[in-house]
Amino acid sequence: MNAAVETPKGLDIDALHRFLDTELGGLDGPLRAELLHGGRSNLTYRVTDGTSGWVVRRPPLGGLTQSAHDMSREFRVVAALRTSAVPVARAVALCEDTSVMGVPFSVVEYVPGRVIRTQADLHRLSVEQIPRCAFAMIDVLAQLHDVSYQAVGLEGFGRPEGFAARQVKRWRNQWEAVSTRRLSDLDRLHARLAATVPAGNDASIVHGDHRIDNAIADPDDPARIRALVDWEMAALGDPLTDLGLHLVYRDPAFDPVLGGSAASTSPRLPGVDELAEYYSRLTGRDLARLDFYLGLGYFKIAVIAEGIHARYRQGLTVGEGFETVGAAVPRLVAAGLSALNGRGAS
């Protein structure tokens, strides 16, 4: 079937062909696949039969934080949001039977467009387009937080009450699971966060990883977002956790986690204060405790980065640019402490 075709690591192309052939009632030809990005989160592949295209997602090789790689959660929220104003790819199929390809995986339609991963990608846009694209990302975030999760059938998607406190506890537990070293500053950051959790905001669907390279923009108008992707950490909870993390991605300390020069850290983008103010105007939410949400964002990224670093040390990453990730962890932790002291990224 596809024996002569070289396929990316982590994907059984013949098994996938049999699965999609059955699910879709026939394919137009043999499948070809390419790795879009992998190893830092769920592995993502573009697959085509020569006529149609799909995106296949599976957990990373040797994943150490299983709750962050739940295929059914990601698929369910994308399917639910299809009826909302939030731009998402069409959900195609979910396979939780590990006998098919060794791991659970999901399939959504391929959405053509522009993915802005690096500063070089961003800087190809005009001076006028760059801020418009940044504010469009906030528009989409506000749209997401405006969706009634009950109306789209996500009542049982999670427990929104106490979400921020559980996030502090969860990422501390994840650190214990993946850490390769002891960091006293991380202990301090966790203690400060645990002691200062806000009472909470209204609950909404949260994306959990909202940044510019997790969006597909229109190739002709990058201020038009065609699809928000990578929903592996979606949940019901405090919407300001999404905003805080999105703003933390503006910090150059995040650069090494994506192999250097992440688009979200470009100095040409609007600053943290400007983006936060825009979100507040759109949603009417009070940002008086934004310092906590920034600190939590740094904490979460630091733990995720440590998990990536651990997989890299074990030879379980797919792709390039992982050798710098470990060094980013102490910088992210230090930035989290600064944010709690009112000196967050601007």
Image: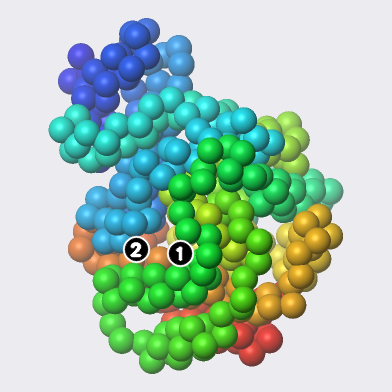
Residue assigned mark 1: 257
Distance from label 1 to label 2 (Cα)? Answer: 8 Å
Residue at the image position 21 percent from the left and 59 percent from the top: 315
In the rendered image, the vertical position of residue 134 relative to residue 260, given as above or below: above
Vertical comparison of 9 with 190: above or below: above
Q: Nearer the viewer, residue 112 or 82?
A: 82
Would residue 255 appear left or right of 316 to someone viewing this image?
right
**C-beta proximity under 8 Å, tags 1 and 2:** yes
Whether residue 145 sits left or right of residue 278 in the image: it is left
Q: Position of residue 49 (x, y in %)?
A: 38, 16
Residue depicted at 79% across the width and 48% down the height = 132
In the picture, the disc for residue 308 is 2
Three-letter code, disc 2: Ile
Relative to 285, say whether 93 is above or below.
above
Q: Nearer the viewer, residue 267 or 139?
A: 139
- Image location of residue 133, percent across then percent down: 74, 47
Task: Using the image as rendered, state which of residue 324 and residue 288 is in the foreground.
Answer: 288
Tell me the element at label 1.
helix
Is 55 left or right of 130, judged from the image as shown? left
Q: Earlier in the sequence, mark 1 or mark 2?
A: 1
* Residue 20 shows up from this direction: yes
Name the residue at 33% across, 74% down.
173
How is colour applied across the structure in the image?
rainbow
Residue under the image location 35 percent in, 48 percent down: 70
- Return the x and y of residue 321 as percentages of the image width and height: 39, 58
In which quadrant of the rendered image does the C terminus lie? bottom right
The amino acid sitting under disc 1 is Val
Mark 2 neighbour density, 10 Å: few (under 14) some (14–19) many (20 or more)? many
Q: In this picture, is 345 found above or below 277?
A: below
Q: Which mark is residue 177?
A: none
Q: Secondary structure at mark 2?
A: helix
